[in-house]
Amino acid sequence: MDKSLNVLRIDASARQADSTTRTLADAVIQKLRQSVGSLRQTRRDLAESLPHVDESWVQANFTEPGQRDREQQRKLALSDELVTELKDADLIVIGVPVYNFGIPAALKAWIDMVARARVTFRYTDEGPKGLLQGKKAILAVASGGTEIGSSIDFATPYMRHVLGFLGISDVSVVAAGQQMVRGEESLSGAKAQIESLIADFNAGNAAAA
């Protein structure tokens, strides 16, 4: 590819070492670097968590941009930075560890910071419309006992829905589920999924060129 691929990587695991989602995200980025002519990565690690949305943040967000005072601008500064990272990305790679059947609080805090009316989505007469169209996302999902894609997996469908709500409907999943049951087989299977996924990704880009 002649055009540089801008990749935003989001890590949400509380674990730095021995994290399956971080391992899978590493593998995705590595495969992309091997197959894409030019890649620029922006990385956002949520392990130390983000501040939660509070009343003053909500008030600042719903104040017209030109009418925000200095304190309101300061309150939204981190959110603005996160939104810019998302807008600049062609591909978003998100590590999604399944905690108690859902996503970690740190990842939910990131979603609350980037899902902003009139910025990343807007309401129309036909319903909400995402403003981040034309992007792709890869979810690197891992769990200890939850079967990914089952009725008790609330993390994967939630992430698909939220990204779709923002306009990112091209979402692929790499899953290493039930590691406490399946052991090394789970991780090996996920790495095989990455091989196939990146091959399809390259084929799709070649066809669009």
Image (cartoon, rainbow, N blue to C red):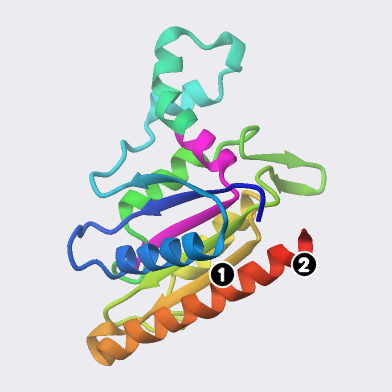
Q: Is residue 208 above or below residue 129?
A: below
Total labels drawn? 2
* Residue 137 shows in the view: yes
> Tag 1: residue type?
Ser
> Tag 2: residue type?
Ala
Query: Badge 2, how many Cα within 10 Å: few under 14, some, many 20+?
Result: few
For label 1, the residue is 172
Please report the residue visible at 49 percent of the width from the left and 78 percent of the height from the top. 195
Query: Residue 194 or 206: which is nearer the viewer?
Result: 206
Q: Quadrant of residue 205?
A: bottom right
Residue 6, magenta (yes or no): no
Quarter occupied by the N terminus: bottom right
Give the side of residue 163 with respect to residue 144, left or right: right
Q: Quadrant of residue 197?
A: bottom right
Q: Which mark is on residue 207?
A: 2
Please report the residue visible at 54 percent of the width from the left and 65 percent of the height from the top. 35
Give the side of residue 32 with respect to residue 178, left or right: right
Q: Say which element carries label 1.
A: strand
Query: Residue 27 or 163: which is nearer the viewer?
Result: 27
Q: Quadrant of residue 143?
A: bottom left
Query: Badge 1, how many Cα within 10 Å: few under 14, some, many 20+?
Result: some
Please report the residue visible at 39 percent of the width from the left and 68 percent of the height from the top. 27
Q: Say which element carries label 2.
A: helix
Quarter occupied by the C terminus: bottom right
Q: Residue 25: where, in percent of width, then height?
A: 39, 63
Magenta residues span 82-98
Give the side of residue 138 with respect to residue 70, left or right: right
Mark earlier in primary sequence (2, 1) = 1
Residue 92, magenta (yes or no): yes
Find the distance from the CA under tag 2 to the CA under tag 1: 18 Å
Give the side of residue 157 with respect to residue 166, left or right: left
